[in-house]
Image (tube, rainbow, N blue to C red):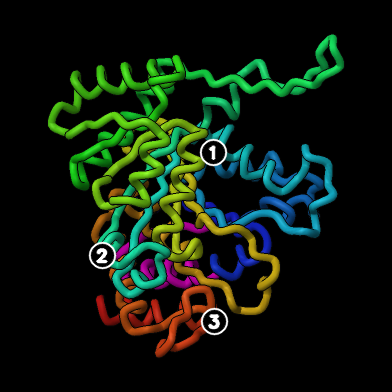
Amino acid sequence: MSKNILILAGDGIGPEVMAQVKRIINWMNAKGLTDFTVSEDLVGGAAYDVHGTPLADATMAKAMDADAVLLGAVGGPKWDNLDFSVKPERGLLRLRKDMELFANLRPAIVFDALADASSLKLDVVKGLDIMIVRELTGGVYFGEPRGIETLPNGERRGINTQVYTTSEILRVAEVAFDLARKRGSKVHSVEKANVMESGLLWREEVQKLHDAKFADVHLEHMYADNCAMQLVRTPRQFDVIVTDNLFGDILSDCAAMLTGSLGMLPSASLGADLGGGKRRAMYEPVHGSAPDISGQDKANPLACVLSYSMMLRYSFDMAKAADMVDAAVQNVLGKGIRTGDIMADGCTLVGCTGMGDALLAELETLA
């Protein structure tokens, strides 16, 4: 049964890296490995230039109807002086909010061919494969009350509220436990239960869910500050980490740099199970729009390609197709083919299109 994919390439290098993903989608369709119908629309600064808003209502409706959304990148200096309400990033935030994408999946994988690029020693990071599951729609970024107020004595005070409900905690923890069952069957639940009531609630509710439904998965609780230390001390102790919005924001970026290149990292944002095997989902590379290299065929498309692999795996349960894409990336890197951001001595420098060429050649070999 054909699946509908909405591509929102966005700004900067977004269209360039997404062009290589479209080549892979077309190749897989032609080989009969997939049956995807692809539509495209605008988001971010590109949408503002045409519609005066970073995400048109009609585009939002397409995203709600799609089986999955692939997003490139948004933003750039061209739109820096816009009012906050219409900045390119607001389009991305609206997608997350309206689609109710509460679980952000951020893998941190060290590819063998890039292990030397990590800031940590080879024996510490070699073979690293961590999945961080970040709660995305609650916590201190959305809690009320919030704002800046002036006190009677003339001082100003900034207020943000860290708040979670049982249901918000349980739904993201369930995603983490489900993922762990398909991986190393181990979950670290991360909070600050020692000093925050919201953290204590988080710990208690995750433990209850584990005991009731996921007793076969090993669960450990860890304070967020200790987790940050352990990520740079012995990162391979982790399989799946589940945590709140604030700590997930920090820890996922920390884990990202263990891999040696931000340009290599994909992500997924998942919503609730809608039944019939469908859930709303959006997939995007972690890197930004990189306006300094936009239009120069220098961008690394691998994070966007790996985001497509995550889409195959988590939206459509197409593990074999996802494994093929992952293997193609591994093999191309193993042959020393590099874009500028991951270039090393003795390797072959290619551009964005050249990396796409290499991936398609490798997929032909694998097929």
Q: Amino acid at mark 3?
A: Gly
Name the residue at 77% across, 50% down: 48
The dot on residue 351 is 3
Drawn side of residue 15 relative to residue 5, left or right: right
In this rendering, would 359 be left or right of 45?
Answer: left
Q: Residue at x 50, y 65 (%)?
A: 263
**Residue 196 location in percent, x, y?**
46, 18
The magenta-colored residue range is 19-38
Of tags 1 and 2, the one toward the viewer is: 2
**Residue 274 seen anywhere in this rendered image of the structure:** no
3D distance between C-alphas at marks 1 and 2:
44 Å
Q: Tell me how far mark 2 sits from mark 3, CA to CA.
A: 31 Å
Which one is in front, 246 or 235?
235
Task: Give the total number of marks visible in the rendering.
Answer: 3
Dot 3 falls on a residue whose secondary structure is loop
Magenta-colored stretch includes residue 29: yes
First in sequence: mark 2 or mark 3?
Answer: 2
What residue is at 43 percent from the left and 37 percent from the top?
134
Above-or-below relation of 272 to 334: above
Query: Contact (CB < 8 A) between labels 1 and 2?
Result: no
Q: Quadrant of residue 229?
A: top left
Percent across and percent down for residue 29 are 38, 67
Within 10 angstroms of label 3, few (less than 14), some, or many (20 or more) residues? Answer: some
Q: Amino acid at mark 2?
A: Asp
Q: Give the Cα separation between the discs numbered 3 and 1.
A: 34 Å
Viewer-nearest of discs 3 and 1: 3
* Residue holding disc 1: 64
